[in-house]
Image (spheres, helix red, strand yellow):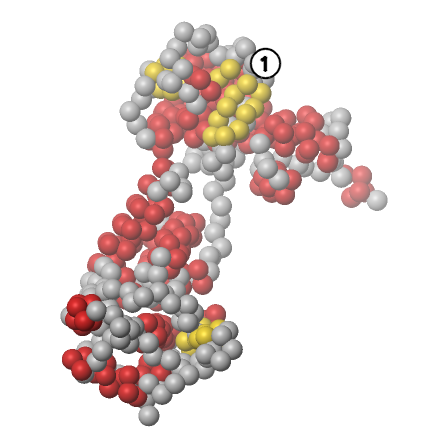
Amino acid sequence: MQTIYKLVTLECQNEHVLEHDLEHTTKFSEPKIFDAHGDLTKRWYVYFSYRNPETGKLQRMKNIYGKTNRFKTKTERYTALNLYRKRLLKLLKEGYSPFQDNTELHKNKQNPKTVQPNNIEKEQPESLVEEVNIIKPKPANNIVSVKEAFDKAILLKTNIVSTTTLSDYKSRINQFQKWLLNHYETVADINQINKKMVVEFLNHMQLSTSPRNRNNYRTVLSSIFQVLEDNEIITKNFISQIKTIRSKPKRHKTYSPKEQESIFNYLENNDKLLLLYIKFISYNMLRPIEVCRLRIKDIDIEERKLRFQAKNKVLKTKIIPDILIKAIPDITHLNENDLLFTPEGIGGTWDAKLINRRDYFSKRFKKVIKDQFGYNENYGLYSFRHTFITKLYRALRKNLSTNEAKSKLMDITGHTTMAALNKYLRDIDAELPEDYSKLLKS
């Protein structure tokens, strides 16, 4: 007796997947894989529901295990269950049912010349029956190459993430593919990539670069593999199960009041454009890349408002403090679509990517200030944002309580939550305790 459960797990020498879908039916649910959240000590299986012919309701059917739980690795189990799942779906679409003996149907399928299509009624024209009979299953190649899979995932990320993020995705995926080619050149199918390979790659990045960079690669790969899982190109995004490792965050140190004043005075005489760029970071609490996005039309001098695209990709509006208004030259005659900052001056076109525009000013700052004053890699343009937020917070704390000062500061810095602001202030050591000498004397 050929039951549907036996047929699913039968080893077949000529396993092909039909290129065409048979008539849509709601008789059964899509077969799914239960992987016990990756726990190899528990039983993994394929499960599905089928509509009970007597009650008319979908009923959970017997789990399909096959030889799955004999395997000791996740990759082997996923491979086995994915085969069972595809074979079960194929059988269900062909009319096999867990509520009946499928022996006769299976024999007819093995001898297609003698079978009449079971979805054609007797009164239908003979020509239609003949037309259906000539439809034959065609072999399909289910292999999706690594490059093809990654290219599709990157494409599907377009318009979802920013151009800068998309560029970062492409760069990191390319590095992973190069590494894969050097260490696992026989890998052709995206489904051949397993957790062990990815962990090896991440270990390589950690040792050759930094833990932080390793974690960034893990984030990108997990995001891409999630797209592949969502589009049923792979069975499981196993990268989400790989843990991030502890890394020392990059710290931009704040400048002392004396250092900040010296830098501003030097730039006033040597690079006024760079000074204005820094003042947007300092007085409006913007990030360097946010300043690089600014266009003439984003600056409303009359209303004293500034519009910019923030880190979370939300278009925000801030007031322009009077101290910055006085530093901005007349821009009313400039093309509103021009960039505010270019290498040549205020207002103009600049055929360069956003990240390259930011890097230009970072390099310009290094040449003009860091090399001149002897600052190391812990100091940079971002340090001015930390410096002036710290300065502002400590000034507010002179007359306001901690909560009142933070609430007012949040409106200025643009942090969306108090938790985010608190973490930021801790990271830059903005809040320091009062002198506790008298406590030590008691």
The C terminus appears in which quarter of the rendering? top right
Question: Can the viewer see residue 103 in this picture?
Answer: yes
Residue in front for this viewpoint, 432 or 356: 356
Residue 128: where, in percent of width, then height?
20, 67
Task: Name the outermost residue toward the bottom.
Answer: 1
Residue 351: where, in percent of width, then height?
29, 24
Q: Is residue 438 above or below residue 305?
A: below
Tell me what residue is drawn at x 48 percent, y 70 percent: 37
Residue on which the image places disc 1: 322
Task: Name the outermost residue toward the front.
Answer: 123
Tell me what residue is drawn at x 25 percent, y 70 percent: 124
The N terminus appears in which quarter of the rendering? bottom left
Residue 281: where, in percent of width, then height?
50, 25
Residue in front for this viewpoint, 16 or 187: 16
Which residue type carries mark 1?
Asp
Asked which quadrant contains residue 179, the reply is: bottom left
Tell me what residue is drawn at x 70 percent, y 27 percent: 396
Residue in front for this viewpoint, 200 or 136: 136
Question: Can the viewer see residue 33 in this picture?
Answer: no
Could you say whether the residue bearing mark 1 is in a helix, strand or loop?
helix
Residue 82 as seen in the image, left or right of residue 278? left
Task: Name the outermost residue toward the right.
Answer: 442
